[in-house]
Image (spheres, grey):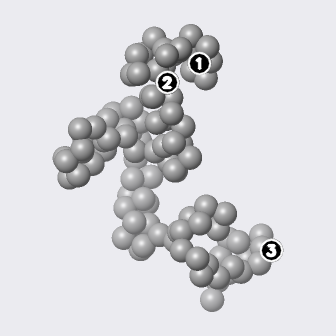
Amino acid sequence: MTPNIYQQLGLKKVINACGKMTILGVSSVAPEVMQATARAASAFVEIDALVEKTGELVSRYTGAEDSYITSCASAGIAIAVAAAITHGDRARVALMPDSSGNGQ
């Protein structure tokens, strides 16, 4: 069996008995997801257009008013807090992370 990248780096093997944990790399990926990722990585795309389209698709399937895909939970929380502070005002968003002009 070929050693995985972590073994090649000399890192110890970890058994995740807790479920999804960021400290353990969150989760493993299903083979179908790996294949889809490989297909996507073989081409270029305008990221803004991709974010817009994926948000539309998630909203369609979940019934949400709007959706935004993030790379991790921490990024989602940061974006949600920024949205709450700026009330969706693009001029205020442009000032972030300086929130001094975003009073109640």
- Residue at image position (77%, 78%) is 12
Do residues under tags 3 and 1 come within 8 Å of each other at their CB atoms? Answer: no
Q: Is residue 29 above or below residue 88?
A: below
Q: Does 37 appear above or below 45?
A: below
10 Å crowding of disc 2: few (<14), some (14-19), many (20+): some
Q: Where's residue 59, x and y in %? A: 24, 45
User: For this view, does 63 lie left or right of residue 84?
Assistant: left
Badge 1 is on which residue? Answer: 99
- Quarter of the image for residue 17 reads bottom right
User: Which residue was labeled with disc 2?
Assistant: 85
Q: Callout 2, which amino acid?
A: Ile
Q: Is residue 4 visible?
A: yes
**Upstream in sequence: badge 2 or badge 3:** 3
Q: Gap in Å between the C-alphas at discs 2 and 3?
A: 44 Å
Q: Which mark is residue 10?
A: 3
Are discs 2 and 3 less than 8 Å apart at CB?
no
Q: Position of residue 85 (x, y in %)?
A: 49, 24
Ranked by sequence position, the earlier of labels 3 and 1 is: 3
Badge number at residue 77: none
x then y, percent, for residue 29? 47, 69
Whether residues under marks 1 and 2 lie with C-beta atoms below 8 angstroms apart, the answer is yes
